């Protein structure tokens, strides 16, 4: 009789321990994975064992960049640092919608630098390269031919510009062709471009001229009517001056535009990708003339929407 009672007590204890273990697992989760998308206050995380997980970011979510060999030191960061391609560790609990509500999000500084380089178009990630390989191969020759034709057209326009003012119309047409080419490049990724504004700057300046502010605020209003939008801000500079100076100018120009969108356009930072300092890359006009230099000193702001959400 005592042996039976002992077995019952042991079985009950094991059952209680199992229930407590399961409840504790459900209450708190610690997942590692790579961010593969951002839509408003949510992001998707690709994990090794749990597949794709939807993570909900709240105002109380703590976002830290861990530092040091033992990762004891940390630096508090903003949500704009959570860019696609960034490996992160998320701790939190699931809500009724099966979303992981994040208490903390941690990542390494070196991983953030790599992810930001990817967003700035410096180096493609292996995952993006594999996903787009077939489509890129099919259109690579056509794109290269278009780029070569555009470069030749730019050189011809630069030579003729000194002789006649009528070439201004040709330069404008060339700019439109380059913008269309850049848009085709953007559409090879996971986002549709739903709106775009380009802001031009004076030489050495990072201040936004008043004439561009209504355009930026209109873009902000358009964005807020779009489901799960993301704002992309990329700053550029002409090749006048040192490379370090131009890199800093492109970053400050992008930061000032983002500040206006946030403070006057009421765009939340949860809907903004980290601003990109593109430096002197992707020149749209020859830097041999003052007119060409003026066209290269710019910030391009785009409204992006994930193609999966748009159904395209």
Image (tube, helix red, strand yellow):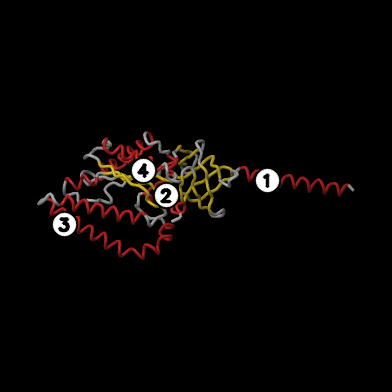
Q: Earlier in the sequence, mark 1 or mark 4?
A: 1
Q: What whole-number distance in Å separates the C-alpha atoms at marks 3 and 1?
A: 73 Å
Q: Which residue is mark 1?
A: 21
Secondary element at image label 4: loop
Can you give x and y, in whole percent of width and height, for residue 205 in the image?
Answer: 24, 37
Which of these two is toward me, 66 or 227?
227
3 vs 1, front mark: 3
In the picture, measured across the screen, residue 184 lies left or right of residue 59, that is left
Instruction: Please state if 47 lies on the left or on the right of 297 as rendered.
Output: right
Q: CA distance from mark 2 to mark 3?
A: 37 Å
* Distance in Å between CA atoms under marks 1 and 4: 43 Å
Do callouts 4 and 3 mark residues in contact (Cβ within 8 Å)?
no
Q: Which residue is mark 3?
A: 156
Query: Label 4 neighbourhood size at 10 Å, few (<14), some (14-19), many (20+)?
Result: many
Q: Earlier in the sequence, mark 2 or mark 3?
A: 3
The residue identified by callout 4 is 275
Q: Nearer the viewer, mark 1 or mark 2?
A: 2
Mark 1 Cα within 10 Å, few/some/many (few <14, many 20+)? few
Quarter of the view holding residue 253: top left
Give the Cα separation between the discs numbered 4 and 3: 33 Å
Along the line of sight, which residue is nearer the eye, 296 or 108? 296
**Residue at the spot of label 2:** 305
Helix, strand or loop at label 2? It is strand
Left/right of residue 46 with respect to residue 20 in the rendered view? left
Residue at position x 37%, y 50% in the image: 193
Mark 4–mark 2 distance (CA, rounded to whole Å): 17 Å
Are dots 2 and 3 in contact, CB under 8 Å? Answer: no
Q: Nearer the viewer, residue 87 or 93?
A: 93
């Amino acid at each position: 009789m005592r042996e039976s009672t002992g077995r019952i007590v042991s079985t009950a204890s094991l059952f209680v321990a199992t229930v407590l273990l399961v409840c504790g697992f459900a209450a708190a989760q610690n997942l590692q994975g790579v961010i593969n998308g951002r839509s408003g206050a949510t992001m998707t995380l690709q994990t090794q064992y749990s597949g794709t997980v939807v993570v909900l970011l709240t105002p109380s979510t703590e976002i830290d960049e861990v530092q040091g060999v033992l990762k004891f030191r940390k630096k508090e960061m903003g949500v704009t640092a959570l860019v696609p391609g960034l490996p992160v560790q998320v701790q939190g609990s699931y809500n009724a919608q099966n979303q992981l509500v994040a208490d903390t999000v941690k990542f390494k500084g070196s991983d953030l630098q790599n992810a930001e380089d990817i967003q700035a178009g410096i180096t493609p990630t292996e995952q993006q390269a594999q996903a787009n390989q077939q489509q890129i191969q099919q259109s690579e020759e056509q794109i290269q031919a278009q780029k070569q034709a555009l470069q030749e057209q730019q050189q011809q326009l630069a030579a003729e510009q000194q002789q006649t003012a009528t070439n201004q119309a040709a330069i404008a047409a060339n700019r439109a062709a380059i913008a269309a080419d850049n848009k085709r490049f953007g559409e090879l990724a996971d986002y549709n471009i739903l709106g775009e504004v380009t802001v031009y700057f004076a030489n050495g300046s990072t201040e936004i001229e008043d004439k561009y502010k209504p355009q930026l605020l209109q873009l902000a209003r358009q964005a807020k009517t779009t489901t799960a939008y993301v704002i992309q801000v990329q700053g550029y500079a002409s090749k006048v001056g040192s490379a370090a100076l131009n890199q800093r100018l492109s970053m400050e120009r992008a930061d000032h535009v983002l500040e206006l969108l946030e403070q006057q356009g009421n765009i939340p930072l949860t809907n903004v990708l980290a601003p990109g300092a593109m430096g002197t890359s992707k020149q749209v006009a020859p830097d041999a003339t003052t007119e060409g230099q003026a066209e290269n000193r710019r910030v391009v702001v785009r409204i992006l929407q994930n193609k999966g959400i748009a159904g395209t």
